[in-house]
Amino acid sequence: MKKIIAMLLVLVMSVTGLVGCGSSKGNEAGSTNASSDSDWAYIQDKGKLTVGITLFAPMNYYNEKNKLVGFDTEMAEAVTKKLGIDVEFTEINWDSKEVELSSKNIDCIWNGMCITEERKQNMSISDPYLYNTQAMVMKKAREKEIMKSVKGLTVTAEQGSTGEGKIDGSIADDDTVKVSAQDYFKDANYVASDSMAKALMEVKSGTADVALVDSVCALGMVGEGTDYSDLVINMDNNFGQQEYGIAFRKGSDVTEKVNEAIKELYEDGTVDTIAKKYGLQEMLIK
């Protein structure tokens, strides 16, 4: 009899335990689903937006006081302040940006990123905020020679960048293109660089003859008073117009919140003030 009672007690306790575990797991799952459904809830919970960047002026770079500054830097700071969260900047390998984003090592890419059809399919992208083109950068003394022909010369661009995509044809030409970069550089030797800054360094050191970089980058980093005063920018070849956007995880509800915050910052004059500081007011998309 005692054995039967003991067995019944064990059975009751087992059933109760199962019900308790089931209820607990259900609540945890519900909480996880709620969090995963909203990227904004996830970011709010940790209290900060982690922004993936590479270093290039005038978007994100360190000034003489070793402080991170730049148009994108200050815009991200202004937006997150308006949204009531902190911002954290982390350097990434540009070629791995989508992986960094999907794995949640970063929450967005805010670093002069050109909007392309492929990127729109893989990520959620904000409204465009800045115009850009591709610029050829070379040594001043060799400009005439290089612009005459790039056959057999070494051209470099940032790996995973729009410049690289234009050279290898992975970014299709559109109706803004006057000269196809893929055709123009077909007889040149292409070598990828880790960043746009590195691409410029390759030209300066003579290991590359020409760099194809964003015009925004070139205008911010090359010329008198810079580390690249011996280089020159040439945009005679119109390789097409691009637009910069901010990338978030696919389906992220943060995208629209950032769009709305930027709209408000336009209205109160903040965007114009920051753009003028970095000489970008003429490139703004309003």
Image: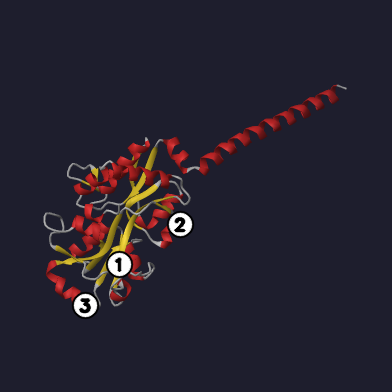
Residue wearing tag 1: 240
Q: Is residue 159 above or below residue 51?
A: below
Label 1, secondary structure: give it: loop
Instruction: Please indicate whether residue 269 sits to the left or right of residue 119 in the image.
Output: left
Amino acid beneath label 3: Ser
Q: Residue furthest right?
A: 1
Q: Earlier in the sequence, mark 1 or mark 2?
A: 2
The answer to whether residue 89 is visible is no
Instruction: Please indicate whether residue 19 sits to the left or right of residue 52 in the image.
Output: right
Cα–Cα gap, marks 2 and 3: 37 Å
Q: Is residue 80 above or below residue 108?
A: above
Residue wearing tag 2: 122
x and y, in percent, of residue 87 in the image: 34, 40
| Disc 1: CA contacts within 10 A as few (<14), some (14-19) or many (>=20) | some
x and y, in percent, of residue 132 in the image: 28, 60
Q: Which of the two residues, 108 or 270, is positioned nearer the viewer here?
A: 270
Q: Earlier in the sequence, mark 2 or mark 3?
A: 2
x and y, in percent, of residue 180 in the image: 31, 73
* Cβ atoms at labels 2 and 3 below 8 Å apart: no
Cα–Cα gap, marks 3 and 1: 20 Å
Q: Residue at x 38, y 44 (%)?
A: 260
The answer to whether residue 181 is visible is yes
Instruction: Please indicate whether residue 240 sits to the left or right of residue 235 in the image.
Output: right
Quadrant location of residue 264? top left
Q: Residue at x 32, y 44 (%)?
A: 76
Q: Is residue 143 above or below residue 63?
A: below
Q: Which mark is residue 149?
A: 3
Amino acid beneath label 1: Gly
x and y, in percent, of residue 4 in the image: 85, 25
Instruction: Please indicate whether residue 23 sits to the left or right of residue 42 in the image.
Output: right
Q: Which mark is residue 88?
A: none
State which mark lies toward you, 2 or 3: 2
